[in-house]
Image (cartoon, rainbow, N blue to C red):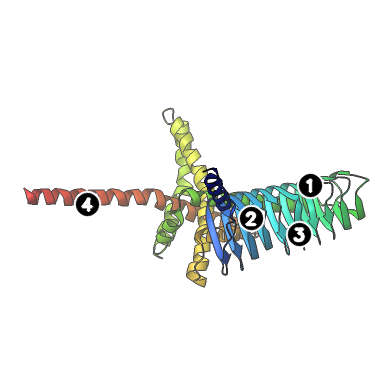
Amino acid sequence: MKKRIFGILLIMSLLLVTPVHAKDINHFYANAGKNITFEDKVIGDSALAGNLVDILGNIDGIGFIAGSTVNVNGNMEYGFVAGKDVTVNGNIQKSIYIAGSNIQFSKNAKINRDVFAVADTITLEGTINRDASIGASELIIKKGSKIEGNLDTNADKITVEEGVTISGTLKYNENAKTDISKEATIKNAETYKQTETNQDNTTNYNGAIISTINAIVVFVVITAIFSNTTSKITKIYEDNKKYLKIASVGLLILCCAPIISLFLLVSSLGISLGFILIAIYIIGLYLSQIFTGFILGDAIFNKLIKKELNAVLVGIIGIVILKLLMLIPHIGGLITIISLIFGLGTIYELVFVKEKKQNKEKVIEAKIKEKSKTKKN
């Protein structure tokens, strides 16, 4: 009896520890959701987006990753990563481009070519086999880090701990606060003077990058919670005649909403309603650029190129393109206004037109039921 029980337990334990093999995917792969855990092997490019994205598998191509929290524990050929908190703990066969709020390269991270990173705080610990270009408020290079090429950085505060090796040149802005250990091995160090114009441009670009990341994260969260939002927007713009109507409604909201809000704030009875309307208006302005980014991406891929892609990836690319267009001198402001107009018009269509249609359908259903009852009687 004891032998039988032991045999059953042995079989169960073997079943429990049997490894689950990752799938091999031989085509472009895209996935989006609230929490994404990627454990497969993709021979090709991939796009992953979510609130939390864990990369445990391999991407033998370009990885487009976006999320609030992103953990790169697997391998990628090239990485384009955007997130609030990003941790790189794997192997990047070539180069990686990262933008975020807090970026950390762990001691196990290995980048075989170059690193391009922009964030509020960047912590380097690991190996970079070529060059690194970094823009940050604070850059911390931890003990044991190795940079085989040059490190070019623009930062407010730079910390280089003992045991760090930089085989090329450490180049940084002369107005940075530095704490560079004498025990660090740096082949050459030099500073450059940062003019006010360059500093303003750097601040503007860094702000634009952070703004783009936040917009992407919000878009991903919206699509994760309200999964049919993108399909509804696509359906709205199927009719080309609707563009003028949406733009007209958006322009009306953009101009009239703040005037109505101010009028309510001045009146003694409508102060609370005025504050609520202002809050809704501000949220609408923020979301409008996100929705316009998706509309732009949808127009490029589905109408011009006529190539079907994952809706989340379409939105991410569209948001990035829109944000880049907004940076163009002289016309960037006009593009911003146009994006607000179409975004507000789209929100109106999503919220109010849908409700009107539902109410009409309910009325029609009620009339049909009444007619059927009268016929029976």
Report if residue 265 is visible in the image: yes
**Which of marks 3 and 1 precedes in the sequence?**
3
Q: In the picture, residue 44 is in which quadrant?
A: bottom right
Q: CA distance from mark 3 to mark 4?
A: 63 Å
Q: CA distance from mark 4 to mark 1?
A: 64 Å
Q: Is residue 40 left or right of residue 245?
A: right
Residue at 90% across, 44% down: 181
Q: In the picture, residue 137 is in which quadrant?
A: top right
**Which of marks 1 and 4 precedes in the sequence?**
1
Q: Amino acid at mark 1?
A: Leu
Q: Secondary structure at mark 3?
A: strand
Contact between labelled residues 2 and 1, with CB atoms less than 8 Å apart: no
Tag 1 residue:
139
Q: Amino acid at mark 4?
A: Ile
Q: Residues within 10 Å of mark 2 (few under 14, many from 20)?
A: some
Q: Amino acid at mark 2?
A: Leu
Tag 4 residue:
364
**Which of marks 2 and 1 precedes in the sequence?**
2
Image spot of residue 333 (x, y percent): 60, 55
> As displayed, is residue 182 above or below residue 151?
above
Please tell me whether mark 1 or mark 2 is closer to you in this view. Answer: 2
Q: Is residue 313 left or right of residue 233?
A: right
Residue at 79% across, 53% down: 126
> Where residue 56 is drawn, which disc sits there?
2
> Where residue 111 is drawn, which disc sits there?
3
**Which of marks 4 and 2 precedes in the sequence?**
2
